[in-house]
Image (cartoon, grey):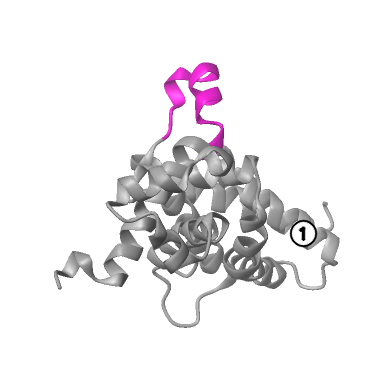
Amino acid sequence: MRADDRPEATRDRLLDAAGAEFAEHGFRHATVREICRRAGANVAAVNYHFRDKESLYEAVVTRAHRYAVDKFPPGLGLGADPTPEQRLGAFVRAMFLRMFDEGRPAWQGKLMAREMFEPTRALAILVNDIIKPQHLELMSIVRALMPGAGEAALRLAVNSVIGQVLHYHHARAVTALLQPAAQYGAEDIERLAGHVTRFSLAGIRDMAGGGG
């Protein structure tokens, strides 16, 4: 049996083909037949490996996000016993690296954007299995920076950190029109991560001191 004929190889080809198809057409309009054509597999292969189209989609979405998190974990580059400030810097930098990763297949970013704007059942699985642990990690970091703060204040601070990073990626088209000289890409990650970290720390310290 050739390596690319093994069941695991067929499964991988289906995942890659499905990712491209779902990213291009969305879950509802993508077809199992076209996915199998792209993967060079029999139509029955989807049922064999994933049970149905919905389960295949869930596997594709979680695989894409897990790939990004495994490649750039929240504690990327941290040494032993890091300070809360260092942990925040690493978290922000890893998030930027995931957002602007040019090494991943182009369809992954498009697929994740589709899932956020056109959520399916896969989103709950994605949040519970992959996003929630990262969220709890950031909550832990902010809690260490704001000892004694209430849960509402912690949530606001956490959402503000995440919102800044998301802005630089999701609002790129708007930024290009509003600020043509201020377009940001992968080459700007270190500068952006440093800015968001410093800006966030200033706001968090102000909140911790009673300013928020």
Say if 163 sits above or below 149 in the image: above
Q: Does residue 178 show up magenta in the picture?
A: yes
Q: Which range is magenta?
A: 169-184
Outermost residue to the bottom: 80
Q: Nearer the viewer, residue 189 or 66?
A: 66
Q: Which residue is drawn at the image coordinates 41% and 46% (left, top)?
A: 33
Residue 112: image location, x then y, percent: 52, 47
Residue 58: image location, x then y, percent: 55, 59
Q: Which residue is labeled 1 in the image?
A: 155
Residue 208: image location, x then y, percent: 77, 61
Say if 172 sits above or below 8 in the image: above
Q: Which residue is drawn at the image coordinates 45% and 18% (left, top)?
A: 180
Q: Does residue 87 show up magenta in the picture?
A: no
Left or right of 121, for residue 92: left
Image quadrant occupied by the N terminus: bottom left
Q: Nearer the viewer, residue 74 or 84?
A: 74
Q: Which residue is drawn at the image coordinates 58% and 38% (left, top)?
A: 167
Q: Main secondary structure of the magenta part?
A: helix
Q: How crowded is the residue under tag 1: few (<14 C-alpha within 10 Å), some, or many (20+)? A: some
Q: Nearer the viewer, residue 31 or 71?
A: 31
Residue 35: image location, x then y, percent: 39, 47
